[in-house]
Image (tube, rainbow, N blue to C red):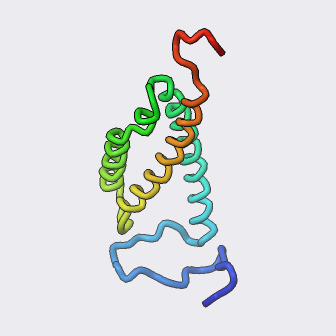
Amino acid sequence: MSTQEPDTQGAPLREYADPAYRPLCASLAEVRAHIDRLDDDIVRLIAERAMYVKDAARFKRDAFQVSAPARQAQVFEKARKLAGRHNQGFANLEQVVDATYRAMVAAFIANEQTYFDTMKDVGDTHA
């Protein structure tokens, strides 16, 4: 087992047995540059989603409504279907997307609950 990082500029050391697989990049450095670009887009979209989650707290009555289990189930199902639709050949992508969404939604709910707990009821004149 190697204890050093791979050479990011070196040639591929392995290849897929599937003849239909088409490499996307010539080096690991190129792969990482694309991943970094996508990460910037993903985090920007998560930040945008976060602001809608924050706004959603204004419409909830209690902690049950903040967690909204039926809505969570809808979101997870939709995410799995989207993964199936967008999959370009990554085995188990639906499971990866499901796990990612479950972690993301749990974190968002915890934060939404914190916002909810610090809000006042509409019409409440006491700060």
Foreground residue, 4 or 99? Answer: 99
Foreground residue, 7 or 95? Answer: 95
Residue in the picture at 58% in, 36% down = 114
Foreground residue, 78 or 66? Answer: 66
If the image is split into quadrants, where does the C terminus sit? Answer: top right
Quadrant in the picture for residue 31: bottom right
* Relative image position of residue 98 (x, y in whole percent): 39, 56
Residue in the picture at 57% in, 20% down = 120
Count of labels in the image: 0
Q: Is residue 2 above or below residue 89?
A: below
Residue farthest to the right, as pictured:
4
Residue in the picture at 41% in, 80% down = 16
Residue farthest to the front, as pictured:
126
Q: Is residue 80 left or right of residue 108?
A: left
Q: Is residue 101 left or right of residue 48?
A: left
Q: Is residue 75 left or right of residue 2?
A: left
* Relative image position of residue 84 (x, y in whole percent): 31, 56
* Relative image position of residue 65 (x, y in whole percent): 41, 33
Residue in the picture at 55% in, 32% down = 51
Q: Is residue 117 above or below residue 92?
A: above
Q: Is residue 67 above or below residue 35?
A: above
* Relative image position of residue 94 (x, y in whole percent): 35, 59
Quadrant in the picture for residue 119: top right
Q: Is residue 53 above or below residue 78?
A: above
If the image is split into quadrants, where does the N terminus sit? Answer: bottom right
Foreground residue, 111 or 30? Answer: 111
